Image (cartoon, rainbow, N blue to C red):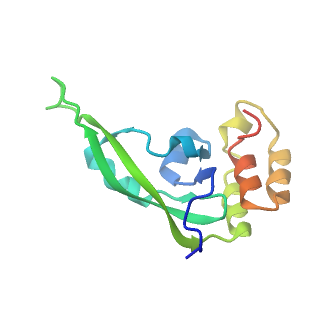
Amino acid sequence: MNADSRLKFPLIELSEWIFEKEKVFFEILESEIGEIHHVKESQIEKHFEREIVDGNGFLVTVSNPKIVERKKSFLSSIFEPRSKVTFEFKNSGKKIDLETLKKRILSKSNQIFHITHNKIMSESDFRKEVEQSENYEKLISVATFLKYL
């Protein structure tokens, strides 16, 4: 375990199910920790499997869901209502290699919405910046387009 178990921000969300839906890698900023998520209660456990990496390269675990408010509506018998939920994010003590993280990000470079649709940068420029990233923080900034948006 890292001697300092605090998370180093920003974090990067690598979860396949989130990427496939949005076609971007999300950054999670310190101010976003503790935010309320609108989630179907049957999908809360899915959040425990999220793949998140912090600015030091440590994997982050998602745990301790707290239901803040249960939503009920007249359509609740047909559609599962979404509840307001908060989660805890903790340093797992397990680290991902910088080169492995770069490869994971580069494997999606031809699908990233900011490249294919928004045209913020070309795929070749993106690949070059990812490959030249010398630390996790810089890599997260490039992969999430944090410095471009």
Along the horizontal axis of the image, is 7 left or right of 104? left
Along the horizontal axis of the image, is 124 left or right of 64? right
Residue at the extreme top: 74
Residue 28's place in the image compared with 15, above or below, is: above
Quadrant containing the C terminus in the rendered view: top right
Q: Nearer the viewer, residue 35 or 131?
A: 35
Q: Nearer the viewer, residue 92 or 125?
A: 92
Instruction: Tell me which corner region of the image, top left, top right, bottom left or bottom right, holds residue 93.
Output: bottom right
Residue 136's place in the image compared with 100, above or below, is: above
> Which residue is at 69% across, 68% downward?
100
Q: Nearer the viewer, residue 111 or 99?
A: 99
Q: How far across and down, in percent of the image, does residue 82 sit?
A: 29, 35
> Which residue is at 62% across, 42% downward?
24
Q: Is residue 109 visible?
A: no
Residue 70's place in the image compared with 88, above or below, is: above
Instruction: Tell me which corner region of the image, top left, top right, bottom left or bottom right, holds residue 131.
Output: bottom right
Q: Is residue 31 visible?
A: yes
> Which residue is at 61% across, 52% downward?
12
Q: How far across and down, in percent of the image, does residue 18 sit?
A: 50, 46
Q: How far across and down, in percent of the image, does residue 33 sit?
A: 49, 46
